[in-house]
Image: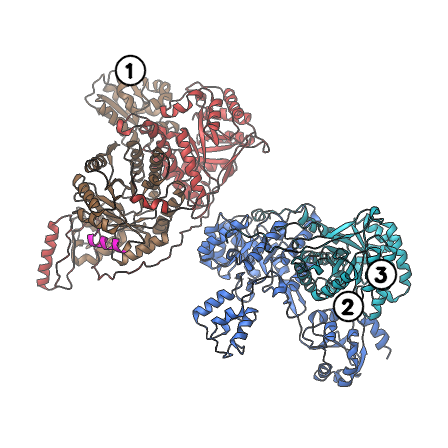
Chain colours: A cyan, B brown, C red, D blue
Amino acid sequence: MSSIPISFEKYEGEIKEVEIGATKTEGGTRSYSVTVGGDKYLPLYSFEGINPNPPRIAHEVYCYHAPLPGSLFNFFGDLVDNPVEWSREAVNKFKAEMVNLRLTDAFSIRNETFKKEISNVIEEVLQAVKVPLLITGVMDIIEMDDYRKNNEILTKSAEICEGEKCLIGPVYTNAFQEIGKACLEKKHPVLAKTNMDVNQALKLNTSLLNLGLTNKEIIMDVTTGALGYGIEYTFSTLERVKIRALRGDKILQSPSIIFSSESWLARELQEEDKLETEKTGITFEVLTAITGIMAGANISSSLHPEAAKLINEFVNNFFNEPKQFITVEEWLKTR
Amino acid sequence: MAKELSPLDIYKLLPKTNCKECGLENCMAFATKLVAMEIGLDACKPLLTSKYRRNREKIWDLIKPTLKEVVIKSPTKEVKIGGEYVMYRHELTYINPTAIAVDVTDDLPKDELIERVKKIENFSYSYIGKELKLNLVAVRSVTEDPEKFGETVKTVVENTSLPMILCTFNPKVMKSGLSEAKNSKPLIYAATKDNWDKMGELASMYNCPLTIFAPNDITLLKSLVKTMKEYGIEDLVLDPGTFPGDGVSATLNNFTMIRRAAFKENDELLSFPLIGTPITAWTQEGRILDKKWEETYLAGMLIVRFADALIVHNLEGWSLLPQIILRENIYTDPRKPVAVEPGIRTFGQPNENSPVLFTTNFALTYYTVAADIQSAKLDCYLLVVDTEGLSVDSAVAGRKLTADRVADSIKESKIEEKVKHRKIVIPGRASRLSGEIEEKSGWKVLVGPLDSSGIPKFMQEKWK
Amino acid sequence: MSEEANSFFNSILDLIKKLNNSEMILENIEAEFSELEFEPVPQRFIPYPAAVPQIKKPTEILKTEFTPPIQIYPGRVVEVKIGATKKEGGTRDKTVVVGGETSPAFYTFESPTPHPPVVSLDVFDTKIPMAKAVKNNWRDVLDDPAEWAKKAVNKFGAEMINLHMESIDPLRENTSPSEAAKTVEEVLQAVKVPLTVGGCGDPVKDLQVFEKVAEAAEGERILINSVTLDMDLEKAAKAIKEHGHVVIAFTSMDMQQQKELDRKLYEYLPKENIIMDTTTAALGYGLDYAFTIMERTRLAALMGDEELQHPLSSGTTNAWAAREAWIKLGPEWEPRELRGPIWEVVTALTLLLAGVDLFMMMHPKAVETVKSVIQRLVEQKPVKPQEVINWVTKKF
Amino acid sequence: MAKKISPTDIYKLLPKKNCGECGVPTCMAFAFKIVEGKANPSQCPYLSEEAKDALLTKTAPPVVKVEIGTGRNKVVIGGEKVAFRHEEKFYNEALFAVEISDRMSSEEIIEKIKEAEEFRIERMGQTLKLNMFAVKSVSGNAEKFVETLKIVKQHTNLPLILCSTTPYSLMKALEFVGEDKPLICPVTSMNVNQMAVLAKKFKTPVAVHGSNLEEVKTLITRLNQFGVNEILIIPPGQNLMDEISSLTIIRRGAVEKKIKTLGYPTLVFPNLIKVNNGNFKDYWEVMASAAFLLRYGGIIILSNIVKWAVLPLMLLRQAIYIDPRIPLQIKPGLYVIGSPDENSPVMMTTNYSLTYHIVSNDLKIQGISTYLLVVDTGGLSVNTSVAGNKINPDSVARLIKENRIEEKVKHKKIIIPGRAAKLGGEIEDVSGWEVLVGPFDSREIKGFLEKKWLRQ
């Protein structure tokens, strides 16, 4: 074997591209749209080829009181209580390319009052910022009833954002009809959430495709286990899904997402000394995103703006201006 | 031989009878001279008796050279190669100068063969009072026909006293050559991985030194040496291959590695003389002149980088001259003083009107000038100025030859009592000092020729 | 041994003595006495052959191992850069770096050559005695150093030019320092390769010229050839350092003097600005002394002598001082057009193998040969043995 | 996908005696175990030498295993078989080396060593720690380098990486610490022969640094000729993108294309990254380290020990190197949290180390003292073990009896996880204890206790 093979496998399949956010011409009010996916090679296999769209980052805005550590509350200050203001700040100050509205979770949905507000919030955010939007419902289903509430709130959201091509979800293997139909009708891509299992992902995608959606309207969420909390399962599932898709499995040929925001639930970040935990938190989030991206994730839904900036720099490194290294010899000369 | 060998180690093994048969006062004197290599082991007669055989062997092991000495003999002459004690000449001195062999082939008509052999034998150049000669005839079998080869060897033996290197890889051809080489020990070239057993047979049967040829493969070379030693053959010569063109790097690397393994890592299997074959330059494509040109500088590099013998093809003077002079230089003993005694020398029958010339006491400069004066049959006085053994231009550049020094040596030599006139001929390369010399010595200065070969012409025209 | 065995033994000894130095092949003599000991006629240094054992003939090659004898030296030769490009404050197109060795010259089985030795061509600023074989190549440019330099670079591929200012010699034209500086500037304009500027050997006049030239060639990082022990080293070094140049420290074949000169220069100049010239003598006229001083200097440097860890330069043109390079020696030694340049080649290649990093040469054919040998030694191309194996049977 | 060796190839070389002395009933089963990397050919006492050699080369991992250091602290790197952890597993954890230079003062060195050695985290039944020190010679002076090593040796016996471009300094260093089998680097085309001689003489592994993969291959071939086979590769590349490509080509080249000269673990330098704005420099080192960890980085040299950077890297390493086929478990039994008394609650969870880590941490944060019974579910989380009915009510009862909980507390009430509500009834019947269904999320336990427990 004299010369070294540059490509190890010829892939027949490729990941379809999904567009998030509709501009005026496409019937929406976004100032631009973001395209993710279209991968022809495994992630960061730049020696085989560069994928058309680099992974993109969405900044999360919570419309409810999420169980976030003290250091984050201090960072966002009173924005936490005003999702619209928080969205505006995310775009203007933190240069967010996309905003992911976290509407509710299993605990806060029980408090009825939030629901009315949520539709107002969505409308106001649609006015406040012109970036593509992700609308995310209940990610931690506990009881069967939670599915019902999730369907309800997301079909409502689909109506409100009609034509805006928002990424709406999650839908589950046993709760996808309502939201699926609504998104098909109102032309939104759907977030298909399964639990770190390739077969579950196959099952859910098949159901959505049978509904009439195409791969170009599905983003897969294999569920993010944060760094130190099951990330290895997310990493391997993302890899297996990407490899199967590239090897020709049509059903799985949709982009996928990593929720680096999950990393802020790590118990290690509960301790008190503020500065240390914030830097640790940012690193937790960045590493969670990197792990997802290097396994094939095409979107990172992120929380701390500093982390988002670092993740963007990391991605940029592989797509246009790679960060230079000094040589080992130079290293041996520096103190 | 261990460099730090002390005469005491030798003395302990000597008969200590102070019998003076070796021509020295006592055994201690003999031991000291032996260590300084100024006397041979065989000068001590008692050591030859079987009583002291064990001691003699022990002494031999102490003083023997690291590199085996191999002797190539003709009925009347012998050429010693190898037998070196050091890797770098400045560590002590080199002993046996690189033996240069020029080739003849067994397809030459007899008269052409004899003419070439005679030319090889008669080749000579006088250099600092010494006649530089070629050493061996390499007889190559291009016909691979045993009779032809045998005949050629016979003719060579009859027409030259030079020992031979018999070159063929074909054992049958070699056997017929050896059988013709009456009363001589030619070097057999060569045993390879294909014919080593038969060539080993011939070497032990005819008791001739044997070359081992393993092109660019030192592991194979060592293995063949080990095999031959098992055969009882001790007189071996190594050829790791001389590769012209791009192969010059591998060639020098192989020669250097073998030498270093022998001297710095005591690798017994590689402690044998090395033979270089610049003749391989002729195997390349291209112009004849380029092949001669490459053969010459390849030979030069191999003389410096450890070849103990060389086989070349080109018999032309311009090509052999730099080789024999380089060999002469590299193999001179760096410990010997390089200067001659300063002072006045007379040539022919000079009188009070004869010219006075001066030169430096660098041996090489003095001998060159002296040779030219003698050949010009010139009666004159030659003043040898002490420049600490530097030639004229090095002495001028190094400011060892100054006007003061010339003036002082004129005074010390009392030449003023010998000649009436006060005119001195200075070397052309010292022309810049002419003004100062006139000032300091009060003698009129004539700037002589740049090279002493110009002295005769100069004296006729300029010396009245 | 029994009396009877002894007498028989002595008779054998006498027989052999008579044969003097030619040996008798003892093939068919049956030895009755088992403890018969065979004593050949002694030769100078020839050992006793051990009693010949019964030879067990090996039937196949006895395998053995060979690992290249690699050594690790404590010392390392410094790297010296000559010439400066526009970016570096000069006007050269290319610069040259020599030195950096960690092993003896071309022991490439041990470590590769960090920088291939450089071959530069001599240019003189006045008439000097020159062998015909050399003069034929430069007749048309002898009186114009700038043209001479151009021809050396454009026609003969010189990587560097050595301008020798013989004319400044008080005992010759005694040209002034400012005139010398003008010539240097002309050559700097004419060619864009690094430049060496040589004096005439007079310590006082050389210093004055060097100071002027150093100023005129500000920033060009030229190589000043040379400073010696009897020169005002502080002044010379200051001028060289101030204007960003490098220097050759010249001694005549004396390691102790060279160490002393280098030591003194360290007070004023960094080690990376110094190249050593331990004097080159021609083949047949002291080449062995030049070779040994250089070989010992390089080995001492590698063994850790910090006062000798500099690249070596050689005025190889001195080879033409040897009469054999140009004198008429009769028809069998002709043609001189070959004998001359081969003299320069063999002188250069011998010193190349001692460790020289910078050659100053004259004859284009010699330059071409030395450059091609250097390139081939540095490249270490693999070898195809079969091509040469058949030299024994080939007709030439 | 890595081409697997078929068990039949292995079986052909086995004695086929089914004697069971290797701990596996039949030779064929033993062959399967070998293929899965769960058994070692040397376990079979009846293998002939050639069979053993043939087996070893057949089963030898495509990436050579290299040992560095000696004794208790010896580390192993390499020995990998796959390019994707889900195909089998990653065998030998990446190693973190902390950088020390001979320009640092002895106090600085001692302090850094102490800090590195004390950095230990107990997590999920494992101790996460730093593994080695990389001592680099900046001065280029042999004596200074050896002096530094003297100080290092006095304060640690972790394996070392000796870094210098001058073989002489390394020779002097090896004369001092040679028998501790340190890794020496970098081998370049300028010093490959001398480094080979050193590696051979002191039997130490080396790290090869080439400007491209072809040059790396030639250097490795040369080292093999000298008989040096314990090698690490420094992936060539001027930037992070090229280095990640090199790392990928090296691993997949070795594993899938069986390129012998690429079958070696790697040594990476995340701290070589050039970042101009200051505060991002440390982050970039962490990001580069993470990228290397995920893409086959073997030994990772960190410039300093900063908790906020090293902790996440250690968690990532732990995660990536967990065997995906068998989840990480802890020993089932009674775990006492805080200082419970006779009135403290009794709770139950599963022995999946991640579940136990979350629950025990939440209890500590909420300041709750309790007797926590850890049930053996084969390392499955509450959710998965309930779904696959891996929680056996009898084992709960047995735990209560074995640990004599009745003697420790007055009451007979046990709180089970919210997601295991289904099993409440059965546990009550079998254990005779009243079952309270706790909250879904262990962060809610404090609220649950206040409402449901303290009022009684």
Instruction: Work out whether residue D452 or residue B321 is closer to the camera in this orientation and state it.
Output: B321
Q: Say whether residue D71 is left or right of residue A104.
A: left
Find disc 1 in the rendering and name its residue: B462
| Chain to which mark 1 belongs | B
Write down the region rendered in magenta. B197-208
Q: CA distance from mark 1 to mark 2?
A: 116 Å
Question: Which of label 3 and label 2 is nearer to you?
Answer: 3
Pointers 1 and 2 within a single chain: no
Pointers 3 and 2 within a single chain: no
Q: Say whether residue A148 is left or right of residue C77.
A: right
Image location of residue B66, percent across then percent down: 30, 51
Q: Which mark is residue D365?
A: 2
Image location of residue C235, percent across then percent down: 51, 29
Q: Quarter-wise, where is residue B13 in the image?
A: bottom left
Position of B451 relative to D109 (above/below): above
Question: Which of label 1 and label 3 is nearer to you?
Answer: 3
Mark 1, secondary structure of its residue? helix
Find disc 3 in the rendering and name its residue: A154
Badge 1 vs badge 2, beta-carbon distance below 8 Å = no
Instruction: Work out whether residue D137 or residue A205 is closer to the camera in this orientation and state it.
Output: A205
Image location of residue A124, percent across then percent down: 89, 53
Residue most extreme to the top? B464
- Taking the image as drawn, is residue D68 in sight? no
Instruction: Work out whether residue D181 or residue C190 is closer to the camera in this orientation and state it.
Output: C190
Give the amino acid at mark 3: Leu
